Image: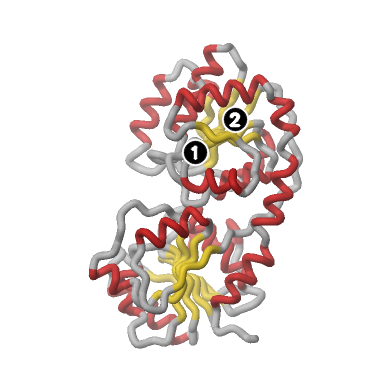
């Protein structure tokens, strides 16, 4: 069956998991349906589309906006949808849906909202019930998020809840030889993302005179840079912590690392965590959100008491004491990723939703 033209809309200006996921989904679906990717003018997606992941054969449209409630979104999104005959819309985000509701009024649109972030406050007031009323499918990318969405988001009369795991490419693993114990964290340096707890947990390595290096790959979320750098400079072992910043070559750091230390306070999904498992790293996280689900799926890694740095320290030290044994237990993780986070399965599930 031929599917109607589809738009993937992500109007975030940032660089992060959601933005990359929107580009990747466009790539995955483009062999099967005509895709238009709609991004904010001057955003990471618009400016880095060819340099970062490419958009082969995918139409790109951009919209200038200065706020999430914007006449520019309403007029331009409506124009693009009508000009390109788009029937399916997959929306990545939240706040811009206020404007998109009005952009889609009177149009025959199959609206799919893709959820990748844990939300904290219910949005079931009259206004949110209105703007979510025309959503056909709420797609969550793990069971934890699906439960969160069903609790937080108002569902319209015809809204359905669907869970679709994202797919991952398994890397060819070429480990880089190194003498020091090497730790890694990947992600934006932001409050609650885990970097602060991770570098404090390294106190136990310093106290036990273990030679190590810890790479933090990711740029800063402002205004978090100042408090984080104050913590960083207070550490007697700060010379062992390397602030890599934003890098397009994250695979190089996965290849160097032994341990992926990722004590996030709450991930919607955690792409970097799955990528670390795929690279046969020993992974350590807090017991919260999707990490508990990953354990239930059978992945081998360590869960620490939630938001407990002492538990993190103990687990880290015990892992290092048994490093060879730990590494011998990692081989099943790649098999599970191939089985669960599977590209044909992901494409098939999205195709079921498209008209």
Q: Nearer the viewer, mark 2 or mark 1?
A: 1
Q: Residue placed at 67% from the left, 46% from the top?
A: 278
Residue 4 is left or right of residue 93, and the answer is right
Residue 123, visible in the rendered structure: yes
Residue 331 is left or right of residue 214, and the answer is right
Count neighbours of disc 1 (C-alpha within 10 A) and say few if under 14, some if 14 to 19, many if 20 or more.
many
x, y percent for residue 18: 48, 57
Question: In the displayed structure, would residue 321 be above or below residue 293?
Answer: above
Q: Residue placed at 70% from the left, 56% from the top?
A: 339
Q: Secondary structure at mark 1?
A: loop
x, y percent for residue 19: 49, 58
Identify which residue, 15 or 133, lies in the foreground: 133
Q: Quadrant of the N terminus?
A: bottom right
Q: Quadrant of the C terminus?
A: bottom right
Whichever of callouts 2 and 1 sits on the residue coming sooner in the sequence is 2
**Which label is found at residue 287?**
1
Residue 38, visible in the rendered structure: no
Q: Quadrant of residue 101?
A: bottom left
């Amino acid at each position: 069956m031929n599917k109607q033209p589809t738009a993937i809309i992500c109007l975030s200006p940032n660089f992060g998991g959601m933005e990359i996921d929107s580009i990747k989904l466009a790539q995955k679906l483009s062999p099967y349906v005509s895709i238009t990717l709609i991004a904010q003018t001057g955003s990471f997606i618009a400016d880095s589309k060819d340099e970062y992941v490419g958009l082969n054969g995918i139409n790109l449209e951009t919209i200038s906006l200065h706020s999430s409630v914007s006449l520019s979104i309403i007029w331009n999104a409506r124009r693009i949808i009508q000009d390109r005959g788009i029937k399916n819309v997959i929306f990545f985000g939240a706040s811009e849906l206020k404007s998109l509701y009005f952009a889609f009024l009177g149009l025959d649109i199959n609206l799919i909202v893709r959820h990748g972030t844990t939300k904290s406050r219910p949005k079931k007031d009259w206004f949110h019930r209105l703007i979510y009323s025309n959503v056909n499918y709420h797609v969550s990318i793990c069971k934890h998020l699906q439960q969160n969405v069903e609790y937080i988001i108002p569902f319209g009369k015809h809204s359905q809840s669907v869970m679709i795991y994202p797919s991952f490419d398994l890397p060819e693993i070429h480990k880089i030889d190194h003498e020091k114990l090497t730790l890694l964290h990947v992600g934006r340096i932001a409050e609650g993302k885990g970097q602060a707890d991770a570098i404090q947990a390294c106190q136990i390595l310093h106290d036990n005179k273990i030679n190590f290096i810890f790479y933090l790959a990711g740029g800063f979320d402002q205004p978090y840079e100042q408090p984080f750098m104050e913590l960083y400079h207070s550490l007697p072992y700060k010379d062992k912590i390397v602030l890599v910043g934003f890098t397009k070559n994250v695979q190089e750091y996965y290849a160097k690392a032994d341990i992926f230390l990722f004590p996030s306070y709450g991930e919607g999904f955690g792409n970097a965590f799955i990528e670390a498992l795929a690279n046969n790293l020993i992974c350590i996280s807090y017991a919260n959100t999707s990490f508990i689900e990953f354990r239930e799926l059978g992945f081998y890694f360590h869960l620490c008491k939630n938001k407990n740095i002492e538990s993190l320290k103990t687990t880290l030290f015990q892992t290092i004491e048994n490093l060879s044994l730990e590494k011998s237990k990692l081989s099943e993780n790649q098999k599970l990723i191939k089985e669960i986070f599977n590209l044909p399965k992901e494409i098939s599930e999205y195709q079921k939703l498209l008209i």
